[in-house]
Image: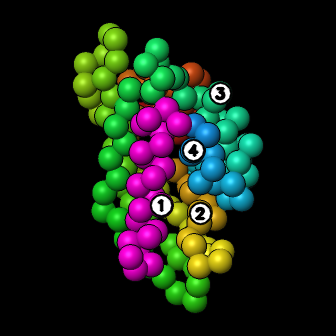
Amino acid sequence: MDDSGAIERLMFSYAECLDAGDLEGVADLFSDAAFGGPDDRHLVVGRDAVLALLRSTVRIHPDGTPRTAHVTTNVAVEIANGSAAARSRFTVLQAADGLLLQPIIAGRYHDRFGQTEGRWRFLERRVLTDLVGDVSHHMLIDPALLGLRSD
């Protein structure tokens, strides 16, 4: 697999873990990385901080998942001198008790990556939201507290 494919696989792992309710797996992806909103006020760093953020914000349903499908598209990866950056778009679909299948949030990821022992890893993920719908079945807190727009 080439570097671009390895980075895309890492990006898609985030959605796969989150949709499976594997918050520990998501946190592992950011073991030494920054994760959060568009500005530094909403940024946490490291596995434990990411896991604490996820546990305090993501609603897990009785089936052990958030009942979501994160769809990542328009992936653009740029690699230079052992580091990389990527931009992509995301749409989160959800269906839960009392909520018909629908898009609940859409936005962009701005990611930075580095290499350790020949393996790509996240250095930073910024989540920029453009559209926010009914996230009441997905989030445990008001999305505005995370710097998410609530149009």
Q: Is residue 75 above or below residue 100?
A: below
As displayed, is residue 12 above or below residue 119? above
The residue indicated by pointer 1 is 10
Q: Which residue has dot 2 on it? A: 122
Q: Main secondary structure of the magenta part?
A: helix
Q: Earlier in the sequence, mark 1 or mark 3?
A: 1
- Under tag 2, what secondary structure? strand
Q: Dot 3: what SS?
A: helix
CA separation, marks 2 and 4? 13 Å
Quadrant of the snapshot with the C terminus: top left
| Label whose residue precedes the other's in the sequence (2 or 4) | 4
- Extreme residue in the top direction: 98
- As drawn, is 20 to the left or to the right of 25? left
Find residue 105 and report its image quarter.
top left
Mark in front: 2 vs 3: 2
N-terminal of the two: label 2 or label 3?
Answer: 3
Q: At label 1, which amino acid type do we have?
A: Leu
- Tag 4, which secondary structure? helix
- Residue 106 percent coordinates (x, y): 37, 43
- Are the two marked residues, 1 and 2, in contact with CB atoms closer than 8 angstroms? yes
Q: Amino acid at mark 2?
A: Phe
Q: Which residue position holds label 4?
A: 25
What percent of the width, then of the height, locates residue 103? 29, 33
Mark with earlier residue (4, 3): 4
The magenta stretch is 1-22
Q: Which residue is under mark 3?
A: 56
Q: Write down the quadrant of residue 56 in the picture.
A: top right
Q: Please determine whether, in this image, residue 120 is positioned above or below residue 17.
A: below
Instruction: Tell me, yes or no, whether the two marked residues, 4 and 1, touch with CB atoms within 8 Å.
Output: no
